[in-house]
Amino acid sequence: MGPQHYSHPHTKEWAAKVASFDGYVFVTPEYNHSTSGVLKNAIDFLYTEWNNKAAGFVSYGATGGTRAVEHLRLIMAELQVADVRHQVALSLFTDFGGDGDLVPDAHHGPTLTGMLDEVIAWADALATLRAPIDGHGEVTGNRETATEAPLVTIEGRRPSLGSNAAEASGAVTGFVEELQAGLDSSDADVYDRHFATDLSWCSPYGQTLAGFAHLSAAHRSLMASATAPPSRYEVVQVLAPPGVALAHVRRQALPPDDPAGFSEMALYALIEHDGQWWLAAGQNTPVTDKPS
């Protein structure tokens, strides 16, 4: 986020500090059923720097400052901040000594731990929504007087999903080798060895089949007739989010120029379950000459 786009040095410094955190814990007194004017003013100086962050609260007052926190929760909603449920509410009568020193009761400990755990969890969960944003206008104490900040482009939030490529690529290679072995030997059991029970399948001709039983019967019939022309499977590329492998696999007719041959491009989705990768879905598209 770009504090350099503010005009005043103190605003730039404050914006940089706020932007550097993924979550916050607000400590607030309660004044007239709300938070302090100083805190409200500090919050209002910024906007985009708060977006898609997480927040927890520690409040203090005659009734624990809970009404100040309720007001802050409304403000956090406008700032696109996820505020957590647990909050620490300190009483002026039981949590402070006679000289004003903080002496919190022991029961606040578990509440504080729960609140911090929730802030961390939400801050992590919102990480993919946070992105650098610049070009916003100067805020002079009230968001209504600021120039509208530009929208975050989708490119700024677009994640990279390929986190376990090595493991998934190995799984896809093994799966494709089984397909090849089953095709070469006309053995449907080998071909379908790691097809999941509830898989979804679309044939090269647009026919859809749901469930292993239906697809296995079709493959057994096809293999028994031995009508499938010879072809070779080739892994083209693999995308590997955690626990998933999405693979483009080319099936090339042999020989490639055989007019009676059959080639297709498949998209296979494999899911890891209890240490084994299973086919969850397959989309098969015949390869034909591009129309002139």
Image (spheres, rainbow, N blue to C red):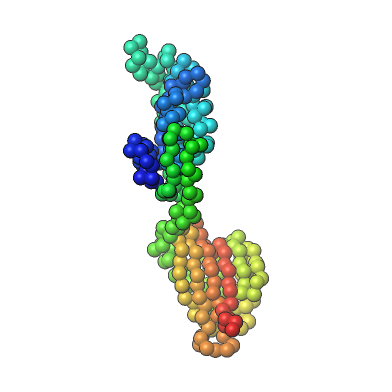
At a point 62% along the width and 78% down the height, the residue shown is 222
* Residue 17 seen from this side: no
* Residue 29 seen from this side: yes
In this view, 204 is above or below 52: below
Picture coordinates of residue 225, whole percent (x, y): 63, 82
Q: Quadrant of residue 46?
A: top left
Total number of numbered discs in the rendering: 0
At a point 61% along the width and 74% down the height, the residue shown is 204
Q: Nearer the viewer, residue 118 or 56?
A: 56
> Where's the C terminus, which quadrant?
bottom right
Picture coordinates of residue 141, whole percent (x, y): 44, 33
Query: Is 102 on the left or on the right of 172, as rendered?
Result: left
Query: Is 222 on the left or on the right of 10, as rendered?
Result: right
In this view, 257 is above or below 167: below
In this view, 180 is above or below 208: below
Q: Residue furthest toward the top? A: 98
Q: Nearer the viewer, residue 76 or 203?
A: 76
At a point 60% along the width and 60% down the height, the residue shown is 198
Picture coordinates of residue 35, whole percent (x, y): 47, 24
Picture coordinates of residue 170, whole percent (x, y): 42, 66
Q: Nearer the viewer, residue 274 or 26?
A: 26
At a point 62% along the width and 69% down the height, the residue shown is 202
Q: Nearer the viewer, residue 16 or 108?
A: 16
Query: Is 266 on the left or on the right of 131, as rendered?
Result: right
In this view, 57 is above or below 21: above
